[in-house]
Image: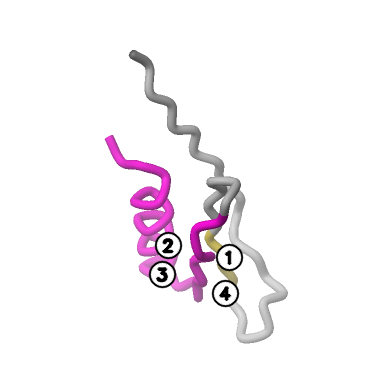
Amino acid sequence: MLDPWEMQELVAGLLQAMGYQTKVSPKGPDGGVDVLAHRDAFGFENAPRARYWWHVYA
């Protein structure tokens, strides 16, 4: 299973392969992960949004 940061790198890579320009945000204290993606040079045409929940159950 991928951790959240591995998943964001995977999603960014897939979007790049689809022709999007991507920027991966750095790790923050809230544990949130983000990939900003757009097709045009100005960032007006955004990629669809996706969310990934990662839970560990003992």
Question: Callout 2 environment at 10 Å: few (<14), some (14 to 19), or many (20+)?
Answer: many
Q: Residue at x 56, y 48 (%)?
A: 32
Find disc 3 in the rendering and name its residue.
16
Q: Residue at x 56, y 56 (%)?
A: 28
Q: Residue at x 56, y 67 (%)?
A: 37
Find disc 1 in the rendering and name its residue.
36
Which percent across, then down, holds residue 5? 40, 51
Residues under labels 4 and 1: Cα distance?
11 Å
Find disc 4 in the rendering and name its residue.
39
Give the number of the mark in front: 3 or 1: 1
Whether residue 32 is situated above or below residue 27 in the rendered picture: above
| Direction bottom: furthest residue | 41
Give the number of the mark in front: 3 or 2: 2
Question: Callout 1 environment at 10 Å: few (<14), some (14 to 19), or many (20+)?
Answer: some
In magenta, the rendered stretch is 1-28
| Direction left: furthest residue | 1
Residues under labels 3 and 4: Cα distance?
9 Å
Look at the numbered discs 4 and 1 and tell me whether their residues touch, using CB distance below 8 Å.
no
Find disc 2 in the rendering and name its residue.
12
Residues under labels 1 and 2: Cα distance?
8 Å
The three-letter code of the residue at mark 2 reads Ala
